[in-house]
Image (cartoon, grey):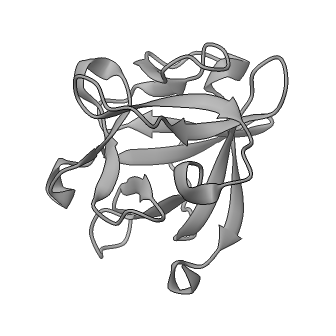
Amino acid sequence: MPPIPVRPGIYKIHAHIIGPSAVLTATEHATKHGAPVITDRLQPLPIEQEWIIEPAEPVPGAPYVIRLAYHEEAGIVSPEDRLWVNSVPRAEFAKFTFESVIGGVKILSDKGLALRAGHRGAQIELVPPKPEFQETWTLEFVRPISED
């Protein structure tokens, strides 16, 4: 499917996994490449679960970067085909596109790999895309970037 445009803004990114509602979450403790990105239950504090999705470059059709809404320098990176949050130069942030799928969107890396949430608490992996619900996400628009 062709990529779809996403309105730049602050989002909660919901995973489609079995069990309680889960959202993309930056963990508190950094390890090898930064803080692992997992799915976790919706928490009352937005600091680790609200993400800015915006174009990587100001040109039509550019891929998107995803960064924490409350830490401008902390964006998603993807060494070893896993997602991490790290304070690195913006040029090192992973780039993503979005495709419409039944029940939500598929988030694809610039290598064409899909984000996969194996289960609540598991680190998000990048895998060859398949029609699986663990690779389906819902983008909940929270507010425009200018209101953070």
Picture layout, residue 5 above or below residue 17: below
- How many numbered marks are there? 0
Picture layout, residue 118 above or below residue 83: above
Q: Position of residue 23 (x, y in %)?
A: 67, 39
**Viewport quadrant of the C terminus:** bottom right
Q: Position of residue 106 (x, y in %)?
A: 59, 36
The quarter of the picture where residue 100 lies is top right
100 vs 85, nearest the viewer: 85
Farthest residue in the bottom direction?
146
**Viewport quadrant of the N terminus:** top right
Identity of the residue drawn at 23% across and 26% down? 79
Q: Position of residue 94 (x, y in %)?
A: 29, 43
Picture layout, residue 144 above or below residue 99: below
The quarter of the picture where residue 81 lies is top left
110 vs 146, nearest the viewer: 146
**Horizontal side of residue 72 vs 33, given as left or right:** right
Picture layout, residue 80 above or below residue 63: above
**Horizontal side of residue 82 vs 138, given as left or right:** left
22 vs 141, nearest the viewer: 22
Identity of the residue drawn at 22% across and 22% down? 32
Identity of the residue drawn at 81% across and 33% down? 21
Identity of the residue drawn at 27% across and 68% down? 57
The quarter of the picture where residue 73 lies is bottom left
